């Protein structure tokens, strides 16, 4: 498996490619956090995820690791920052297919409750440095990540409701 360079939270400020997508869910922030931090729940809601194994479940601290299968990728990740219930960030450390030389993904949660209705904004940000041969296809890479994360964040509500 190709090894990627380490990525800190600050990497998002200078990455070659930064992509984001957000949703506002009708659920309280603790419910949303519980599903995101529960690695075993990812195959239920994360688009294309077929398997997950983790050193810790749920993730509670930086340094914890997991392996996720998202067809056609097998990805080894480690937590960079876990700040319940607002920030979940991880770096990709290894992957079976060379998709980046450095990669950081994070989910930021914010309580957007209003008028007595509990709501949570979830924003995914992906920061990537691409291998030289993928740089001309930057828009295609961006589209592929959005085609995974956009439906996944929409599916997140179903996983939350199923736990209620």
Image (cartoon, rainbow, N blue to C red):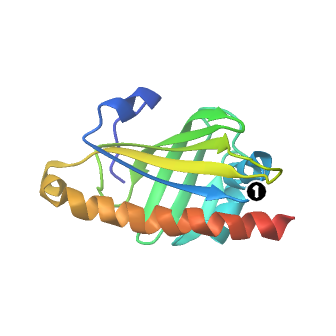
Residue 10 is drawn in which quadrant?
top left
Residue drawn 61% across the image and 32% down it: 62
Residue 106 rendering spot, x and y as whole percentages: 51, 43
Identify residue for label 1: 27
Q: Is residue 114 above or below residue 74?
A: above
Q: In the image, is 126 to the left or to the right of 84?
A: left
Residue drawn 71% across the image and 39% down it: 85
Residue 142 rendering spot, x and y as whole percentages: 31, 58
Q: In the image, is 87 to the left or to the right of 84?
A: left
Residue 114 rendering spot, x and y as whole percentages: 75, 48
Count of marks, rendered view: 1
Q: Is residue 115 above or below residue 7?
A: below
Residue drawn 72% across the image and 59% down it: 26
Decide which of 28, 103 is in the foreground and name it: 28
Per the image, label 1 sits on a secondary structure element best described as loop
The outermost residue toward the right is 164
Q: Quadrant of the N terminus?
A: bottom left
Decide which of 159, 37 is in the foreground and name it: 159
Residue drawn 68% across the image and 45% down it: 112
Residue 157 rendering spot, x and y as whole percentages: 69, 65
Badge 1 crowding class, 10 Å Cα cut-off, few under 14, some 14 to 19, many 20 or more, is some
């Amino acid at each position: 498996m190709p090894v990627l360079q380490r990525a800190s939270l600050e990497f998002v400020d200078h990455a070659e490619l930064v992509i984001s997508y957000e949703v506002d869910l009708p659920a309280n922030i603790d419910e949303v956090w519980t599903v995101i931090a529960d690695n075993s729940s990812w195959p239920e809601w994360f688009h294309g995820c077929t398997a997950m194994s983790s050193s810790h479940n749920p993730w509670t601290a930086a340094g914890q690791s997991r392996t996720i299968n998202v067809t056609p990728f097998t990805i080894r990740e480690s937590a960079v920052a876990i700040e319940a219930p607002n920030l979940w960030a991880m770096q990709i450390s290894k992957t079976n297919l060379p998709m980046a030389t450095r990669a950081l993904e994070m989910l930021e949660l914010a309580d957007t409750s209003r008028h007595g209705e509990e709501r949570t904004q979830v924003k995914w940000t992906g920061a990537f440095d691409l291998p030289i041969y993928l740089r001309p296809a930057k828009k295609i890479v961006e589209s592929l990540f959005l085609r995974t994360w956009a439906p996944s964040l929409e599916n997140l509500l179903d996983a939350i409701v199923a736990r209620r």
